Amino acid sequence: MLLFYIIIFVFGLIIGSFLNVVIFRLENGEKIVNDRSKCLHCKHFLGWYDLIPVLSFILLKRKCRYCGRSISIQYPLVELGTGILFMMIMMIMNYESGIMNQELLSTFYFLLIASALIVIFVYDLKHYIIPDKVIYPAIVITFIYRMFEILKFNHSDLIGILNQILYLLFPAVLAGGFFYAIVVITKGKGMGGGDIKLGFLMGLILGWPLVLVALFLSFIIGSVVGIFLVFAGNKKMKSMIPFGPFLVLGTFISLFWGERIMKWYLNLLH
């Protein structure tokens, strides 16, 4: 299985390279599938040897081959992060038990939604905004996938289907409504509209009660990072800090270890 995970990691690196293109072209209003990749500074078209994930960044010593300007550390970090996340997704889906035992639809869904969350993480971190072109398709895809899951196991009992749809929407409305309340109370100073949509997406992805774990972790991590930045002098108490990246982190942690965290917490209470 080691070879399998190496292949998945390399595949993740390649997808991560594509996600970097998506992030850049979203912020510049370009079509995602547009032209050949080029240097952001000198606009020289890049060859395939300039686009090898991580490796090109190392060999070029973080500089453009043609103009010598610095290449952002974002590129290898996104590539590595995507590769690692793809491997972790395969692990939690228990592919050791045999690839043929897994549903390709579920695999494709989780890899796709992980990619969308990575784009949201980086874009919000850089621009303090969650792109609608990513969040809306992610919500639609997740809803369709969850509906497919419901209908796969229950396609005859209409009342049962309606109850499961309500159970599906409850955590999404709860998380989205929570952020909506914060936006209204703070008049948009505490949270933004993008956080409402991301909260809704989190509820659809994680369901109940894992969405609570994700929200709790997001606020804890956000508070710790915010305090650190203030003490480090990078931010002031009233400075804006994008919350989307912390929500994405909370979602991934809850997806991978949420049930273990809940069991640990409940055992602690008892």
Image: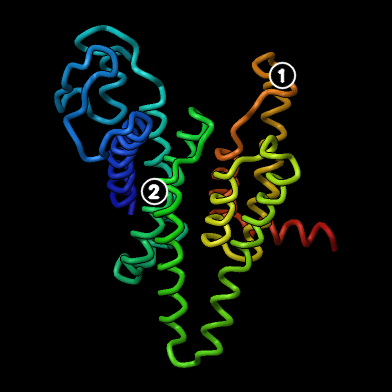
Q: Residue at x 67, y 54 (%)?
A: 213
Q: Residue at x 67, y 21 (%)?
A: 229
Relative height, residue 253 to residue 267 (above, below): above
Disc 2 packing (10 Å; few <14; some 14–19; many ≥20): many
Residue 171 point in image, percent of width and height: 62, 64
The mark nearer the N terminus, 1 or 2, is 2
Relative height, residue 77 to residue 133 (above, below): above
Residue with the most extreme bottom position: 156
Where, quadrant-wise, is the C terminus in this rendering?
A: bottom right
Kindly state the secondary structure of the residue where label 2 is placed. helix
Residue 155 point in image, percent of width and height: 43, 88
Residue 59 point in image, percent of width and height: 26, 17
Disc 1 packing (10 Å; few <14; some 14–19; many ≥20): few
Q: Which numbered disc covers residue 202?
A: none
Q: Which residue is mark 2?
A: 86
Q: Is residue 253 left or right of residue 119?
A: right
Relative height, residue 32 to residue 113 (above, below): above
Q: Is residue 44 left or right of residue 259?
A: left
Residue 175 vs residue 56, the one in the foreground: 175
Q: CA distance from mark 1 to mark 2?
A: 36 Å
Kindly state the secondary structure of the residue where label 1 is placed. loop
Query: Which amino acid type is marked by label 1?
Result: Lys
Query: Which amino acid type is marked by label 2?
Result: Phe
Residue 50 vs residue 187, the one in the foreground: 187
Residue 28 point in image, percent of width and height: 34, 29
Mark nearer the viewer, 1 or 2: 1
Q: Which residue is mark 1?
A: 236
Residue with the most extreme top position: 68
